Image: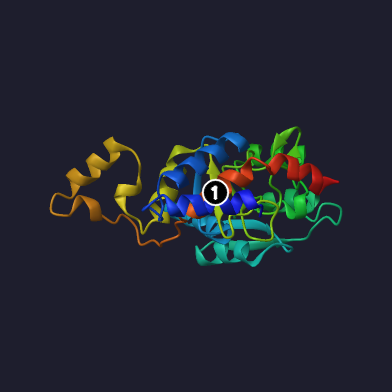
Amino acid sequence: FTKQDLQNASNFIKNTNMLTQGKKVLAFEKAWSRWLGVRYSVFVNSGSSANFLTFLCLNVMGKKGGVILPSLTWISDVVAVIKNDFRPDFTDIDFKTLSMNEAEILNKIEKKNNKILFITHAQGFNGLTQKILNKIKQKKIILVEDVCESHGATFNNKKLGTFGLVSNFSFYYAHHMSTIEGGMICTNDSKIFRLAKVLRSHGMAREIGKINLEKKIIKKYPNLSPKFIFLYPAYNLRNTEMPAVIGINQLKRLDKKNIIRTK
């Protein structure tokens, strides 16, 4: 953290009465989407929550089956799969990339009960290959990317986190960009985006963020308070304004910090 990070956070606290999720969270989500090159981002309280919420979304959407995931990853990836009723299919790694072995992935994709590839881009390395991308497209396998340690890493001159249906990032204290604690869910899919926002905040309909959809839901339940219609049994995985302020400031330096990290 720089003095400027801390000064921005201090100035914000002194000049606001809104500390929970608000305009700064929205501004950080939009800034992150622009930097990464995706349409939507959802700021949550950790990378672990991003993993969990991603698979909760897929579960709610009726996506079932086995998940190909690495034997070398953080425990939250495994918990996200198991606790959302998916079956983990652990896969050995390539020592050069610390990600899943290409041949192992291709072999496991042929199993009919594997529907999702959950790849971890570990320690700044890329775990994708063109053969993998070709195969998942051919077999209609959903790709979820864990980019929690690899912000800014690329494959074929395209940033990791833009290849999958969903990607997850972490802004934990030890990572090369930090909001102290925090994580981001990224996608180009509008349904996943709106569902993630609802599930991030107790399953409340008012979080859906699209007026015409909210009006339809309110009309469907005329006897309920419009502010307190809960669509799903969900959780509070929101983040707050001050980490977003720090994130906005840190994002400005991320590309330069990545050059240092690479060296």
- Total numbered labels placed on residues in the image: 1
Tell me the quarter of the picture where residue 113 sits: bottom right
Looking at the image, which residue is at 60% across and 50% down?
A: 5
Residue 88 lies, in percent from the top left, at 62, 63
Q: Quadrant of the N terminus?
A: bottom right
Coordinates of residue 190 in the picture (x, y in percent): 45, 38
- In the rendering, at what x and y percent does residue 23 appear? 41, 44
Q: Is residue 231 left or right of residue 52?
A: left
From the viewer's side, name the closer residue of 76 and 23: 23
Q: Nearer the viewer, residue 116 or 154?
A: 154
Q: Nearer the viewer, residue 175 or 243?
A: 243
Q: Is residue 189 left or right of residue 143?
A: left
Residue 167 placed where, x, y %? 59, 47
Name the residue at 67% across, 58% down. Answer: 69
Determine whether the residue tagged by mark 1 lies in a helix, strand or loop: helix
- Using the rendered image of the protein, determine whether residue 231 is visible from the camera's viewpoint: yes
Color encoding of the figure: rainbow
Quarter residue 217 falls in: top left
Residue 63 visible in rendering: no
Which amino acid, by three-letter code, is at mark 1? Answer: Asn
Q: Residues within 10 Å of mark 1 (few under 14, many from 20)?
A: some
Residue 253, picture quadrant? top right
Farthest-out residue, left: 223
Give the residue at x 81% y 46%.
260
Residue under label 1: 8
Q: Seen in the image, is 253 located left or right of residue 198?
A: right
| Residue at 20% in and 50% down | 226
